[in-house]
Amino acid sequence: MSAILMPLAVAACAPENASAPFTPEYRGIQTDLLDGDLVNFRVAMTGARDTGDVARYAECAAAKYALIRGYGFARHVRTNIADEGGIWRGDAVYTISPALPRGLKTIDAEVVAADCAENGIPMV
């Protein structure tokens, strides 16, 4: 491949929105204590790149909520995400606990909350 065609080939492989800036607008968090240590987090945002940004917003809410309640850990139960007219909504459920819970999807609330704060993701 010639040197002139090489940049075109590389550009063709890049995602269409790769150069678009990530400018999320976080539109709020609603929490509901379902039962003892089971908590529902509903989040809304615009400007999400994909479902991962919405899930991360809910995870940040869960981490801070656990810390506020005096717990150090949370375990992800489920997250449902929908994009409705450009507004991304997440509906996530976590358990919170003072000790590391069983399961694969556990989070250390202090570590996650610190990372969320560093990245400008709002929390409860």
Image (cartoon, rainbow, N blue to C red):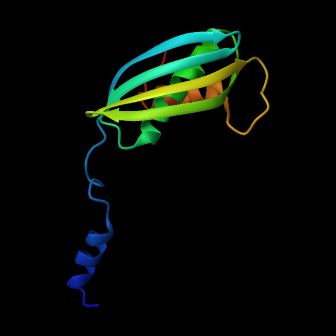
| Residue 75 pos. (x, y %) | 68, 28
Q: Is residue 12 left or right of residue 121?
A: left
Q: How many marks?
A: 0
| Residue 61 pos. (x, y %) | 52, 21
Q: Nearer the viewer, residue 42 or 110?
A: 42
| Residue extending furthest toward the bottom | 1
Residue at x 26%, y 70% (from the top left corner): 11
Q: Nearer the viewer, residue 50 or 115?
A: 50
Above or below, 7 relative to 82: below
Residue at x 56%, y 18% (from the top left corner): 40
Quadrant in which residue 105 is drawn: top right
Residue at x 79%, y 22% (from the top left corner): 99
| Residue extending furthest toward the left | 4
Above or below, 20 relative to 12: above
Above or below, 4 relative to 51: below
| Residue 80 pos. (x, y %) | 50, 32
Quadrant the N terminus occupies: bottom left
Quadrant in which residue 78 is drawn: top right
| Residue 109 pos. (x, y %) | 64, 24
Q: Is residue 95 left or right of residue 65?
A: right
